[in-house]
């Protein structure tokens, strides 16, 4: 049985993240989406909200489970008994950053493996921060996030 | 009649921006420089100051007009009835960011077109933030901004 | 009246090229597609064939004209009285190469201007060489080139 | 049961390839290494030699199988009933090329998935062509290929 | 006599910095490590602490001297009578940023020369911010900084 | 006494190369320009011609010496007793290639050090192949190569 983890901030989850979740879930027996609790970085959505949004958006996929975690990623991966970390790559800048992270994690724990998936062409321009910015200016986000969570995001982004 | 818009923060305008304004103005009938009002991002110069600095620096070019705008760029482009957005590219990092922005804008409004110009080799190292940093440390900015606005920038950068 | 030229090898023209032709034609009064005659580089299609394929594929666009040219691009641009060269950008590697070309052309003729358009996300993986390789292995190219020229390309790629 | 394929030219296999084979084999039930038969590209080693060198170098890994294939990769993946293609990434240039290939393959067959692994830092400078060049100039390749195949490579590279 | 300066924030110094210090010291007669005093950027370690950590870590190298400086780098280089600035490059993003800096410095003072060294493969994933983040989460930093300064860094990162 | 070597094909030497030669010569006691004899790669100019062109172009610089070499660069560096290899960087693609070369050379000989200089902005678009192409089409190369060798290059490029 192969377990993959897909970590991130997901502030909030986008169609780009869901594309990775869908495709990664088909390549393993269990996919655990890990929402990072990072006290030093301010998020728009709370950890619980972020977990709930992913659960709502990914509810149709059988072998996906959503959790939050704090501390070092490599420690959480070990606790979860996972075989690999899954990361999405959208652009060269992602590539360089993720290459450094994968190398760092390898030094921290040589057992930890990272697998990358390229974002589908149509989703490679989507990011959580773009979603928040567009929503905050009253633009339509229906091409960027699943329909079931549009309202919650619009509400939050315009209540600030 | 072709109308192009050239959006940016211009905090403050540099010789790199002016190079693009000059070259883009020759390729369209009207070029509208758009100074972005972004309340969530702190700027050193106010919107009015930024508009005035560009007007002063670009005063010799006939078909250029300077305005401020807020909200989504694609909405402003539509209001102005513009045919294309003009952006300058200095480096690979610009390229990736602008590619994502162009793709996002295409999704928000499929009619919106973006055209890119490469910065002239001599200007590709110049950025508004470099100008502010150098001026703030008392360095000379005469190679980086038009002469007519050097004093205003030196004054502002050293009054903080 | 603004004239843009769009130079290339077009060996053969792809949906990616046509996307640029369509979008660029809307931003100028006349778009001249220039097929490069380069005796030192072997092409699969002859110059005449390449010109014909583009004409067939772009026949619905009023202000587009297709020609061949040899020698330095900047010389041809001057002869055509064009205001700018149009180039498509698909990836960071295109960007760097085109930046060098634009700089070189600026040194050869300071009047020559180059404008860049980003490939639409769906077309950014398409290249003439990929089309030839896929066609040569019997794969389907219907997503990569216009329908009206599929047969000619399949024939040529499999007659070798 | 998950099947991954790892395609390439392997002309010849290097420690960088073996690193990917070792790591990928742990993440699936069966890993099929696919040696590409490409008649239009001249290789130093024949297909049979390339297959044999990989078999020799990877003989200790239980769930790895080595084969050759020709034609479109997506067709071979379907025949092998594989769940994903595995590719190694060493640098930004690999990234861009592989992103285009993954997008192309998705258009040719939407079922085909590609997973990427970053080369380990120590192997990211190694390539088959570097091995051939160094060996051909009489340099030592013992840091670049498995010991069991050094002699065969040295012999071949110096018999030309 | 050739003098090189190696400027940076060093907040704190890492094995990656030390690798550059060691290698650069061999290529000149005197290497001056310059710790930047930047009042507009918050650092975890004070200037004095950063200077002390480097001195402790680099104490075995004869021709290395550690100092702090403020203001424009080019001014400090001139005061020190240095022949060149030394910078380490880890990734493409470093490259582009440093290229812009080198060009800016050339405009500010055409006499100033910058030399670059590539980070050794094993150190290219290490950065001061990664060290602080890992230490702050209780991870082990023994692979990332010299042993003699581990305790001081762990103490500081966990006292916040 | 510090000795640097600056290796390359120099087919033919350009103003970009001369810029590096001039700047590097100031940072060491002796700079040895090394013209690579590579029998597997066809050059337009013979080794002797390439050496002569550099000698002619760099004749005013006291501590520069021009030689040819064959075989592994690291072996030649050792024979010359050199302290470092000097390479010029023009773009991200150079950076990645040179990073791999520097890593490879470090494995072949851990004593060998490589130093990089960024091309001056005005020279970063110049390459030997661009010079040959422009000269071959009858364009002017006076901005790209030193005046003293223009005639020889024009003659050679148009005699083919």
Image: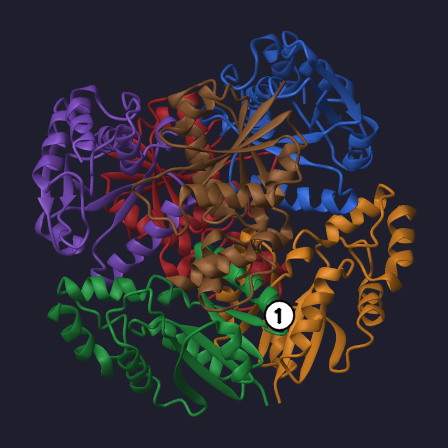
Chain colours: A blue, B red, C purple, D brown, E orange, F green
Is A27 in front, or is B46? A27
Is D154 in front, or is D25? D154
Where in the figure is residue B79, as x and y percent of width and height? 36, 24
Where in the figure is residue E36, as x and y percent of width and height? 71, 65
Direction from residue E26 to residue C29 in the image, left or right: left
The residue positioned 34% from the left and 61% from the top of the image is: F125
Residue B160 visible? The answer is: no
Vertical position of residue A135 compared to residue D86: above or below: above
Vertical position of residue A75 compared to residue A14: above or below: below
Tag count in the figure? 1
Is F112 in front, or is E33? F112
Q: Quadrant of residue A85?
A: top right
Where in the figure is residue B25, as x and y percent of width and height? 27, 45
Vertical position of residue A96 compared to residue D116: above or below: below
Chain assignment, label 1: E
Where in the figure is residue A142, as x and y percent of width and height? 51, 14
The residue positioned 59% from the left and 19% from the top of the image is: A18
Circle 1 is placed at which residue position? E73
Quadrant showing the N terminus of chain E: bottom right
Q: Quadrant of residue A98?
A: top right
The residue positioned 37% from the left and 28% from the top of the image is: D72
The residue positioned 91% from the left and 57% from the top of the image is: E151
Direction from residue C73 to residue A64 in the image, left or right: right
Helix, strand or loop status at disc 1: helix
Direction from residue F153 to residue D67 in the image, left or right: right
- Mark 1: give few (<14), some (14-19) or many (20+) Cα within 10 Å: some
Is D62 in front, or is A65? D62
Return the residue found at the far bottom: F62
């Amino acid at each position: 049985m192969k377990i993959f983890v897909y970590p991130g901030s997901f502030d909030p989850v986008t169609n780009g993240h869901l594309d990775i979740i869908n495709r990664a879930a088909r390549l393993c027996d269990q996919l655990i989406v890990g929402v990072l609790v990072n006290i030093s970085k301010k998020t728009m959505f709370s950890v619980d909200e972020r977990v709930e949004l992913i659960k709502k958006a990914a509810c149709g996929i059988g072998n996906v489970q959503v959790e939050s975690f704090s501390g070092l990623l490599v420690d959480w991966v070990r606790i979860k008994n996972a075989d690999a970390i899954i990361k999405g790559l959208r652009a060269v800048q992602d590539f360089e950053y993720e290459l450094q992270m994968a190398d760092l994690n390898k030094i921290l724990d040589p057992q930890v493996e990272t697998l990358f998936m390229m974002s589908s062409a149509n989703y490679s321009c989507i990011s959580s921060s773009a979603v928040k910015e567009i929503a905050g200016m009253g633009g339509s986000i229906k091409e960027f996030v699943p329909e079931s969570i549009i309202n919650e995001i619009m509400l939050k982004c315009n209540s600030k």
